[in-house]
Image (cartoon, rainbow, N blue to C red):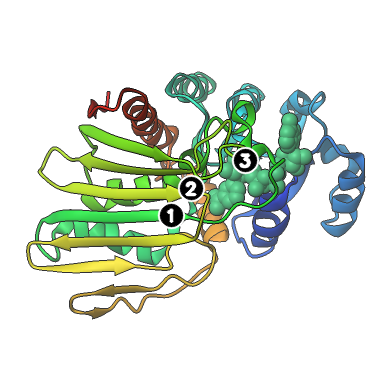
Amino acid sequence: KPLGIALVGLGYYSAYQVAPALQQTKFCKLTGIVTGTPSKATEWEKKYTIPKKNIYDYKTIDRIADNKDIDIVYIVLPNSMHAEYTIRALQAGKHVICEKPMAVSVKECQQMIDAAKKANRQLSIGYRLHYTPHHQEVMKYGREKTFGKVKIVETSDGFKIGDPNQWRLKKALAGGGAMMDIGIYALQGSRYTVGEEPVSVWAQEFKTDSVKFKEVDETILWQLKFPGGAVANSSCSYAAGLERLFATCEDGWFEMGPCYGYGAIKGRTSKGDMNLPQLNHQAAQMDDFAQCILTNKPTRTPGEEGLKDMRVIEAIYRSIETGKVVPVS
Ligand code: NAD
């Protein structure tokens, strides 16, 4: 029997990516929702035939503990709400998928990991790209040194952000700007291409609109040094589109682009096109997690993976503040 998933927060990502993907999954299905908007509850109840008893709001969410139809709670809320609702769902005895960025500080990430251990439940971060053949291939090139040792990586992710009133531009809800939201993909890309954790970072922030980006970062450029000698040059931006992962190695190169969006990923190497199958990222991610729970195997994107990113992001912000190269610690 497929595991039941309850979505918490029915905004863009839940409505247009996760819920449609749950119509394609084999090992899990949409059985519950948590929303603060009564009209959304009615709409989703009809659209996805969700029983009334499986519909919660932010006050009643803890009662999910008594609901056998729900095995996994998927947190799709603004970033600063991730920690609280992840911990509450774990305390209710449910396994949790939490969207990226895992939280807004290393401290919160650690509290979430501790809560999962205490509850003896699995916590997975919504790093959907880890479940795609293309990104898995890049991880393999790094690990197996297919083109020799990776020397220099260039990664970048960005888009032009619209509505100036959205939560992504409010520090209290987003935790940060482009870095937290999409820079995390460029950061992840460099970490799993090299297959090591960076030791130091140097970063600079640029702003062209100090009104719109009063509270959060617009564009950040950063460089990472890895212990084996590889270096990464990366960027993220809310000012314009950017989407690339490139790695040059001792005996060749590989690159992807587009590579962070939901659509088809394109990849090339110095030996030719990657030519790998495309799949629905979110369906692959959720089915993998359901199988991990069913077979008692660890998820490939646990809370520890989210915490590693947050450690680098905090170092990036520290470097911007001090103007210095700072250790990632
Ligand atoms: P959104 O604004 O479309 O949805 C947010 C939801 O949270 C809304 O339903 C809103 O009503 C609800 N909410 C509850 N309390 C709120 C509050 N105090 N302020 C604002 N909204 C509140 O955002 P989204 O694009 O769906 O993003 C949600 C999360 O999903 C974010 O953490 C984001 O980083 C993540 N996300 C991940 C991907 C991915 O590819 N993995 C893509 C998009 C978004």
Label 2, label 1: how far apart the Cα atoms are: 6 Å
* Residue drawn where x is 50% and y is 57% of the image: 240
Read off the residue under disc 1.
157
**Amino acid at circle 1:** Asp
Q: Is residue 160 above or below residue 86?
A: below
Point out the image quarter for the C terminus. Answer: top left
Counting residues from the start of the chain, the first of labels 3 and 2 encountered is 2
User: Based on the displayed image, in which of its 4 quarters is residue 139 positioned?
Assistant: bottom left
Label 3, label 1: how far apart the Cα atoms are: 19 Å
Q: Nearer the viewer, mark 3 or mark 1?
A: 3
| Mark 3 Cβ and ligand 1 under 8 Å apart | no
* Residue drawn where x is 85% and y is 59% of the image: 47
* Residue drawn where x is 23% and y is 26% of the image: 327
Q: Does dot 2 land on a helix, a strand or a loop?
A: helix
Q: Position of residue 30 (x, y in %)?
A: 72, 51
Label 3, label 2: how far apart the Cα atoms are: 17 Å
* Residue drawn where x is 73% and y is 54% of the image: 15
Q: Is residue 79 left or right of residue 102?
A: right
Read off the residue under disc 2.
182
Counting residues from the start of the chain, the first of labels 2 and 1 encountered is 1
**Amino acid at circle 3:** Lys
Q: Nearer the viewer, residue 124 or 269?
A: 269
**Amino acid at circle 2:** Ile
